[in-house]
Amino acid sequence: MIQYNCSSPDSLHAAVNASWCSIREDECHNRTASQSDLCLSRNAYLEKYLGPCRSPFFLPMCVTYLLIFVVGVLGNSLTCIVIARHRVMRTTTNYYLFSLAISDLLVLLLGLPLELYELWSNYPFLFGVAGCYFKTCLFETVCFASVLNVTALSVERYRAVLHPLHAKHVATHAHAKRVILVLWAVSLLCALPNTSLHGVEMLKPRFGLTFPDSGVCTVIHDRWIYNLLVQVTALLFFILPMLTITVLYVLIGLQLHRERECFDAKTGLSQDGVNQRARHRQVTKMLCESRFPAVGILEWVKRIS
């Protein structure tokens, strides 16, 4: 067995089995390809091919995540408690807001700790293949559910403004619950393809050594399939919903503008008319307030990059 100039007892060279070197003599004696790696410690070897185990941005990200966690859990928990405890708050609109709050809580309570742990220790991934599937499926499902909930809420508001008589008979509590259940089921099904592409990948054995502490949760199948899936989901769960929401709220805004002009013409500038116009503006603000889930946008940016 050739003697390399590796002084450290922690180097891979010290762990290489002599019997392997006699079998793989060509690789063992390939100084240009192997010597530099053999002289590395196991941790240095992992860092060379996997990057630093701990993110250099761990501390600022930890502080940021902690603030998001506290504010998010507090705000979304209060939303759920208020809607659940007070019957007057159980409107069809608030059912969708309740569903959005649940999706946010799932990310905060289950997903955020996993993300923080990966910043602390990128490898090895300690939760196995099942944990990798769970993490991927959770983020995908919650992201899709948030987008579909916002889109469904926009459709309900559109019908309430432009087709109020029809909405009065259709937009019932039971209808909203059924829609929300279907949206979550569709989100879960659409999350399965990307989940199936992930798994725990380790560095290939080398020098007769294995690296079980190199496991990372990542894409393990053909990259082109993953890239195609990213484009399809971006189209179905970002571009099309955003266009739909934009069109619906433009139509809502136009309808409210026409109603305001008609309302102003009828009421004039009397005090009662001024008060009614103020209330009308509050209704307009309520109808037009909406949010598009930033977690979805950030996740797609992360995946595309």
Image (cartoon, rainbow, N blue to C red):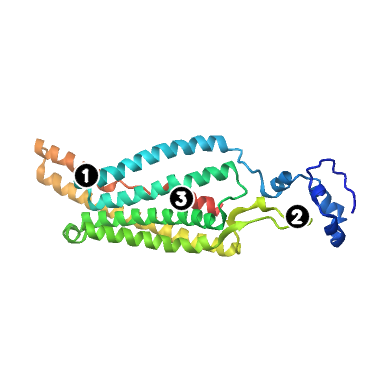
Seen in the picture, residue 103 relative to 273 is either above or below; the reply is below
Q: Quadrant of residue 40?
A: top right
Task: Give the amino acid at mark 1.
Answer: His
What secondary structure is marked by label 3? helix
Q: Measured from the top left, where is residue 9 in percent x and y?
A: 81, 42
The residue positioned farthest toward the right in the image shown: 2
Q: Quadrant of residue 304?
A: bottom right
The residue at 78%/43% (across/down) is: 10
> How far apart, in angstroms, are the residues tagged by discs 1 and 3?
33 Å
**Which residue is disc 1 drawn over?**
86
Task: Give the amino acid at mark 3.
Answer: Ile
Q: Earlier in the sequence, mark 1 or mark 3?
A: 1
Badge 3 density bin: few <14, some 14–19, many ≥20, Cα 10 Å: some
Badge 2 density bin: few <14, some 14–19, many ≥20, Cα 10 Å: few
Q: Nearer the viewer, mark 2 or mark 3?
A: 2
Q: Measured from the top left, where is residue 248 in percent x and y?
A: 30, 56
Q: Earlier in the sequence, mark 2 or mark 1?
A: 1
Q: Mark number for residue 232?
A: none
Q: Measured from the top left, where is residue 204 in percent x and y?
A: 71, 58
